[in-house]
Image (cartoon, helix red, strand yellow):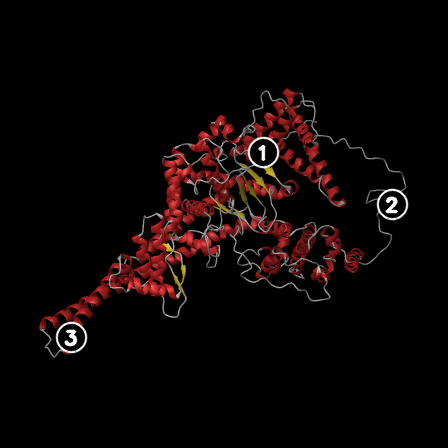
């Protein structure tokens, strides 16, 4: 009988059928597999497709499968009080005695919860968790350091869940999941990645389109109130300064009067009148100031109340989005494991566990090299890492919030490649084996690219520079303590993101890629892997783009902050200072040193005298006179003089040197790293100016997150650097560099070697060589978000292609079922 379903309804049911059939390939328990199979058969029935299932006839044993029949094969043989519950409890106790992990799916929850008090006693960590066989894990390749971290993760789990039936189920599910995930790991890097994966599942929010509109409107209103408050607070500045001047005037007159009185002179009427007038003027201004402040304070109080209400509304919107993210049994389960567990998975953040952060440092530094810690009968020798040993790192996003921006969906790595003109998208094991995590990172990357395109004013299909930039997801780790971080490889021109270090670092790494690839494109030659525009702007052809790169470099490095120099002073230095500075006929440098009055000004005076001289003799003289200047002002008995007379730099660069522990160019103070971090600041500031945010593109590019450390520019320097980036990308847009690169395949092939053609984002179906493959892609598009009109149009396209290609079937059973359902609608035989 033909179905009465519309094409749209049939498309939706087909999509659900594909997803349900996909579950059958997973590791399901027998009850779950039976339920899933039943759902598949039900969907097939609704679609009007008869399932050709003919069960094997069992031998007649005289019993019935009908529960209502007197000879039902599973009928009770007698009465046993509460037997299911008691058996369920006995099963848990038996598992505990044998040291076995109890999986959530093996618990008869309906029976257990008949007595909630007994359920609360049974569903606890000591009953369900089982014993960990560390010897077997070590034999399987797990390192002692990784095992130690896993043991600390287990120790952080709350011993008892909250007293609630649903929470008990979630808790049991999380216990089994954390063991299955952790005990398949072997290295510290893998443990860190697994913890970050759990954190990703616990946190994060994506605002819906409607919520984004509300959020942006509230943010704009809040900004208006902030600006008004700032203006009001500055409104009385003139009056305040006038009061200060009035005070100064009073003090001047009073000083004049006291001087005359001290000398025994009479105070003139003119002075007396001036003092009275000055005090009256001061009182008048003070009265005006008080009145104005009273008025302003009242308005500021109103503004504060309005702002508090807006903050409350914005928080509610974000909380609602976060709640949706957490509406799954496993996410609820992670939270049911307690605050200590949450602190461990958030160890990289200020709110996370400092103790576990120290454990990770010890593990990475090779200080846990044997399995002695696993012997619980004796004290372990593992000590807590010192604060100095926990090396500085940029923070990764605690959660990935996105506010504003176009709706972007990448259903696959192939779609990501096509959308942004990338060379290839490479996937590592965690992508290939974990479709949920892979989907998350691919979709976040697509949204980040889209937002970056908006901010830079460059069409997103050109961001891959004509297929010369590659992307990788967890495929290119090199091991070591930094293995979990995102990075850019200049040799292969590829950005690699990891599950743990990828979020918040994409913008940073993409700028490295642009900085490295653009000089080659602009010069028409491959160039060296070490060639970056920000470090070698002279390698770029003369013109506006070179000028912009040079201006950016100056903004990053130049300033008036001088590094500290340490001068070692000897007796000979003091003698030379005495003879060259105090001498009657001291030369120009000697007179300058003597008149300077302090060591800093004296050394700087010497630098000015020899400025611009590069001959060997002048350089030597400059060095000698600087030593003499330092010796002249070093106190007697002191051997060292520390003075801020080093090279003048930006504060951003100076702070980076401090992060490196002194000495520039180690890592944080490398010019290319300065540029990439500054680019993060620029992008975040520009996003914020448009009321937008994307934590996956860049996160925490503000020094307020770093407890006194300063990895990012700030203040006036930040504004100057942002302006330099704006000028650079303006020059790149004016020169259409990205667009021309994408269009000039011949030139790019000449520079970098040929690459495969970029697959078009929308496949042309006419004349396709493999109609089966094309059909498969179209059917799978039904799984993406579509409006009713688009879904119906896509359904008709599928039916048309089936009719034209004389459908013969594919290797995908789910696809076969979906196609047959669509054919039934069109009354076309399969």
Question: What mark, if any, has residue 259 been given in the picture?
Answer: 3
Q: Residue furthest bottom?
A: 264
Question: What mark, if any, has residue 71 been given in the picture?
Answer: 2
At label 2, counting other C-alpha atoms closer than 10 Å, the crowd grade (few under 14, some 14-19, many 20 or more) is few
Residue to which mark 1 is pinned: 414
Q: Is residue 267 left or right of residue 518?
A: left
Question: What mark, if any, has residue 402 been given in the picture?
Answer: none
Which of pointers 1 and 2 lies earlier in the amino acid sequence?
2
Secondary structure, mark 2, is loop
Q: Quadrant of the C terminus?
A: top right
Q: Height in image: 466 above or below 504?
A: above
Which of pointers 3 and 2 lies earlier in the amino acid sequence?
2
Q: Quadrant of the N terminus?
A: top right
- The residue lying toward the viewer, choosing from 564 and 50, is 564
Q: Is residue 277 left or right of residue 443?
A: left
Question: Residue drawn 22% across and 67% down?
Answer: 247
Residue 296: name its quadrant: bottom left
Q: Is residue 755 left or right of residue 86?
A: left
Question: Residue drawn 73% across and 60% down?
Answer: 127
Task: Give the spatial CA distance, label 3 vs label 2.
Answer: 124 Å
């Amino acid at each position: 009988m033909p179905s009465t379903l519309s094409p749209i309804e049939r498309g939706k049911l087909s999509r659900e059928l594909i997803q349900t059939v996909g579950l059958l390939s997973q590791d399901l328990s027998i009850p779950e597999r039976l339920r899933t199979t039943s759902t598949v058969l039900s969907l097939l029935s609704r679609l009007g497709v008869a399932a050709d299932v003919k069960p094997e006839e069992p031998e007649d044993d005289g019993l019935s499968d009908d529960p209502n029949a007197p000879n039902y094969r599973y009928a009770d043989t007698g009465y046993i009080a509460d037997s299911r519950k008691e058996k369920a409890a006995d099963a848990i106790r038996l598992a505990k005695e044998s040291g076995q992990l109890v999986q959530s799916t093996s618990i008869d929850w309906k029976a257990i919860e008949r007595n909630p008090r007994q359920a609360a006693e049974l569903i606890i960590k000591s009953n369900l968790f089982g014993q960990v066989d560390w010897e077997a894990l070590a034999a399987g390749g797990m390192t002692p350091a990784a095992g130690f971290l896993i043991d600390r993760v287990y120790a952080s789990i709350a011993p008892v869940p909250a007293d609630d039936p649903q929470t008990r189920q979630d808790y049991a599910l999380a216990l089994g999941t954390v063991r299955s995930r952790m005990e398949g790991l072997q290295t510290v890097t893998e443990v860190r990645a697994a913890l970050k994966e759990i954190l990703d599942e616990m946190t994060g929010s994506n605002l819906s389109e409607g919520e984004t509109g509300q959020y942006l409107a509230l943010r704009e209103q809040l900004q208006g109130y902030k600006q008004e408050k700032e203006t009001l607070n500055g409104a009385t500045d003139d009056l305040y300064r006038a009061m200060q001047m009035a005070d100064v005037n009073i003090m001047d007159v009073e000083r004049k009067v006291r001087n005359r009185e001290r000398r025994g002179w009479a105070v003139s009427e003119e002075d007396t009148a001036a003092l009275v007038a000055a005090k009256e003027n001061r009182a008048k201004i003070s009265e005006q100031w008080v009145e104005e402040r009273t008025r302003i304070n009242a308005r500021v109080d109103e503004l504060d109340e309005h702002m508090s209400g807006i903050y409350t509304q914005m928080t509610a919107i974000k909380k609602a989005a976060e709640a949706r993210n957490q509406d799954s049994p496993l996410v609820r389960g992670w939270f049911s494991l307690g605050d200590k567990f949450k602190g461990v998975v958030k160890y990289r953040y200020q709110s996370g566990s400092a103790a576990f952060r120290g454990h990770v440092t010890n593990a990475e530094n090779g200080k846990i090299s044997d399995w002695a810690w696993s012997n619980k009968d004796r004290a372990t020798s593992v000590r807590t890492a010192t604060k100095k040993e926990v090396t500085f790192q940029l923070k990764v996003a605690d959660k990935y919030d996105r506010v504003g921006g176009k709706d972007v969906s990448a259903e696959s790595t192939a779609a990501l490649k096509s959308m942004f003109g990338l060379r290839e998208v490479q996937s590592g094991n965690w992508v290939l084996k974990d479709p949920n995590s892979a989907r998350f990172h691919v979709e976040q990357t697509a949204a980040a690219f889209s937002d970056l395109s908006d901010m830079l004013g460059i069409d997103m299909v050109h961001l891959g520079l004509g297929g010369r930039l590659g992307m990788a997801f967890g495929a290119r780790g090199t091991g070591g303590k930094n293995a979990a971080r995102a990075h850019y490889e200049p040799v292969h021109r590829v950005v690699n993101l990891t599950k743990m270090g990828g979020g918040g670092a994409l913008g940073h790494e993409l700028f490295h890629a642009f900085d490295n690839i653009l000089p080659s494109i602009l010069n028409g030659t491959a160039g060296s892997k070490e060639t970056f525009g920000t470090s070698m702007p002279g390698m770029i052809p003369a013109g506006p783009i070179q000028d912009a790169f040079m201006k950016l470099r100056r903004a990053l490095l130049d300033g008036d902050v001088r590094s500290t120099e340490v001068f070692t002073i000897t007796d000979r230095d003091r003698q030379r200072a005495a003879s060259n500075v105090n001498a009657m006929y001291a030369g120009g440098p000697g007179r300058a040193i003597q008149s300077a009055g302090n060591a800093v000004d004296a050394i700087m005076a010497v630098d000015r005298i020899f400025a611009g001289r590069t001959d060997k003799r002048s350089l030597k003289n400059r060095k000698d006179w600087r030593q003499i200047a330092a010796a002249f002002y070093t106190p007697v008995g002191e051997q060292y003089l520390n003075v801020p007379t080093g090279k003048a730099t930006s504060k951003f660069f100076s702070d980076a040197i401090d992060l490196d522990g002194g000495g520039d160019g180690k890592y944080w103070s490398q010019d290319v790293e300065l540029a990439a971090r500054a680019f993060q600041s620029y992008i975040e500031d520009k996003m914020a100016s448009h009321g937008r945010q994307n934590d996956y593109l860049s996160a925490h590019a503000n020094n307020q997150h770093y407890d006194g450390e300063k990895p990012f520019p700030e203040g006036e320097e930040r504004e100057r650097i942002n302006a330099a980036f704006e000028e650079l990308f303006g020059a790149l847009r004016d020169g259409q560099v990205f667009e021309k690169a994408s269009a000039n395949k011949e030139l790019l092939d000449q520079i970098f070697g040929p690459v495969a053609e970029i697959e078009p984002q929308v496949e042309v179906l006419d004349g396709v060589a493999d109609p089966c493959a094309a059909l498969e892609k179209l059917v799978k598009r039904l799984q993406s978000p579509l409006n009713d009109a688009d879904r119906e149009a896509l359904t008709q396209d599928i039916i048309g292609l089936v009719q034209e290609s004389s459908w013969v079937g594919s290797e995908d059973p789910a696809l076969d079922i979906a196609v047959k359902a669509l054919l039934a609608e069109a009354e076309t035989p399969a």
